[in-house]
Image (spheres, helix red, strand yellow):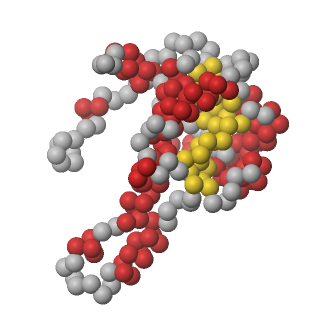
Amino acid sequence: MPFDVAETDRLLTTTRSVRRRLDLDRPVPREIVEQALEVAVQAPTANNHQNWRWLVITEAGVKEKLAEMIRSSWAFHRNDMWTNAGRRRNDAQARRNYDSAQALTETIAAVPVLVIPCVLGRPPDIAAINARWRARMADKIADDPGHLVQHGETRASIFYGSIFPAIWSFQLALRSRGLGSTITCLHVPHERETGRLLGIPTGVTQVCMIPVAYTLGTGFRPADRYRAKERTYWERWGQ
């Protein structure tokens, strides 16, 4: 059966990062989160590893401790981010995004559900992987094509390339059920402390955090973006 293309496109183009319009007072049923996660795990996964794990947090005391870490990270991140923003600091949309991120740090403890997507294992060390490969190729003839190979970048692409499609599917599934979400990485600088708080093993990578709540209103629209054709090249870069 064909998809309703118009409705599918509406879902895809109006699923926004929701920070200030999260309903902090309306409970989110467990079954809704579970439904959205069942959709998420249908996302493509490299080599069918399915090495994602999802930690769902609803306990008020735990959320407050996480919020303290997030506010600590934000205090450092905002200064660095705003310094590096340069002329973009004068851009109205950039300022709205900054204010929105600031607002989330102030309310995140009250968000009904926080989800931490994780990946089993640690991010690949690109330089170390490439160094080991060069050592293996050291006795090969000069024109061996293996000298042109860089495995480290591939491993890194695979590591994160499996989890982020699942994260986006989770967010789309939430949106289709009337909920909003966003991706924040502000707890990651406190990964070890978070791991101790939540019992996450040190060999597991915490990728980000997704605040989940019903939205205040449903009138989301496509963002103000450059047209794809203005940023798309065919056959060669720049043409």
Q: Nearer the viewer, residue 20 or 140?
A: 140
The residue positioned 64% from the left and 37% from the top of the image is 115
x and y percentages locating residue 140 in the rendered image: 27, 84
Where 185 falls versus 108 (above or below)?
Answer: below
Find residue 138 and report its image quarter.
bottom left
Find residue 14 and report its image quarter.
top left
x and y percentages locating residue 205 in the rendered image: 60, 54
The residue positioned 49% from the left and 16% from the top of the image is 220
Quadrant occupied by the N terminus: top left
Q: Nearer the viewer, residue 22 or 172?
A: 172
The residue positioned 42% from the left and 60% from the top of the image is 155
Can you see residue 18? no
Can you see residue 199? yes
x and y percentages locating residue 120 in the rendered image: 57, 54
Where 59 falls versus 193 (above or below)?
Answer: above
x and y percentages locating residue 17 in the rendered image: 53, 29
Where 153 falls versus 239 (above or below)?
Answer: below
Q: Nearer the viewer, residue 152 or 84?
A: 152
In the drawing, does residue 186 fall left or right of residue 84? right
Where 15 falls versus 169 (above or below)?
Answer: above
In the drawing, does residue 76 fall left or right of residue 37? right
